[in-house]
Amino acid sequence: MAGKPVLHYFNGRGRMEGIRWLLAAAGVEFEEKFIEAPADMEKLIKDGSLMFQQVPMVEIDGMKLVQTRAILNYIATKYDLYGKDAKERALIDMYTEGIVDLTEMILQSVICPADQREAKITLVKEKSKNRYLPAFEKVLKSHGQDYLVGNRLTRVDIHLLEVLLYVEEIDSSLLAPFPLLKALKSRISSLPNVKKFLQPGSQRKPPHDPK
């Protein structure tokens, strides 16, 4: 029996949080080794564990995988969360890239200099309300199904739930005009593995504290 995946990253959300979410949704237990000092990062590099000298890095199935998308693609494929054929995977990839764009904007609003934060958050609100949330609401309305692709749970439903929760942290009113997204958020949050991950004490990371 293979051991649990081991996640190497900082003790925060960053680019590892989506990986934590996907593993948790798939019901996979994992361990974390936090990088807490420069020496920890230096050791990983010196050991040859980081192909491009950067994290996230996940030890899984005898591999040391780096690059966030590559890690997510492997997990989604391994745990059957990547659609049933090439067409479904294309839609999943397309939707995921949009979610990644919004997630990246949110991340930048957190790590940017304090004097830029208000402008970045204003941009996140505007793009969420006028670009990203309407696009996903339209997808759900177009087919009337419970999930974004193929009428079953895939990675993109998990990615979307994650970013919807981030949007709510910024402004809880932003989801109000999107009833289908609100329903999807409730539906995915109620899945046993996801519900467990949302409970206090899980490996889900709290919002970043700018201080």
Image (cartoon, rainbow, N blue to C red):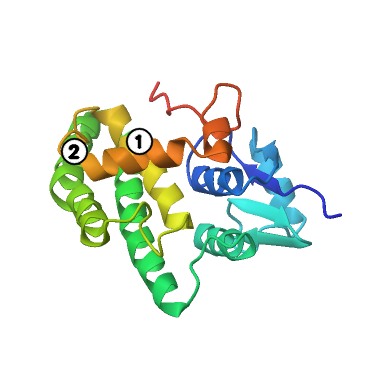
Towards the viewer: 50 or 95: 95
Towards the viewer: 161 or 7: 161
In x, y percent, where is residue 31? Answer: 72, 40
Q: Earlier in the sequence, mark 1 or mark 2?
A: 2
Q: In which quarter of the image is residue 25?
A: top right
Relative placement, left or right, of 101 versus 40 is left
SS type, badge 2: helix
Amino acid on which disc 2 is placed:
Lys
Mark 1–mark 2 Cα distance, whole angstroms, equals 11 Å
Residue 112 shows in the view: no
In x, y percent, where is residue 200? Answer: 55, 21
Relative placement, left or right, of 103 versus 130 is right
Q: In which quarter of the image is residue 32?
A: top right
Q: Do the residues labelled 1 and 2 touch (CB within 8 Å)?
A: no
Amino acid on which disc 1 is placed:
Tyr
At a point 32% along the width and 28% down the height, the residue shown is 169
Position of residue 132 relative to residue 199, above or below, is below
In x, y percent, where is residue 182? Answer: 28, 38
**Label 2 crowding class (10 Å Cα cut-off): few <14, some 14-19, many 20+?**
some
| Residue closest to the far right | 1
| Numbered badge on residue 166 | 1
Position of residue 138 relative to residue 188, above or below, is below
SS type, badge 1: helix
In x, y percent, where is residue 171? Answer: 23, 28
At a point 17% along the width and 47% down the height, the residue shown is 127
Relative placement, left or right, of 12 versus 89 is right
At a point 64% along the width and 63% down the height, the residue shown is 78
At a point 58% along the width and 63% down the height, the residue shown is 80
Tag 2 residue: 125
Rendered-image quadrant of the N terminus: bottom right
Relative placement, left or right, of 199 versus 124 is right
Residue 31 shows in the view: yes
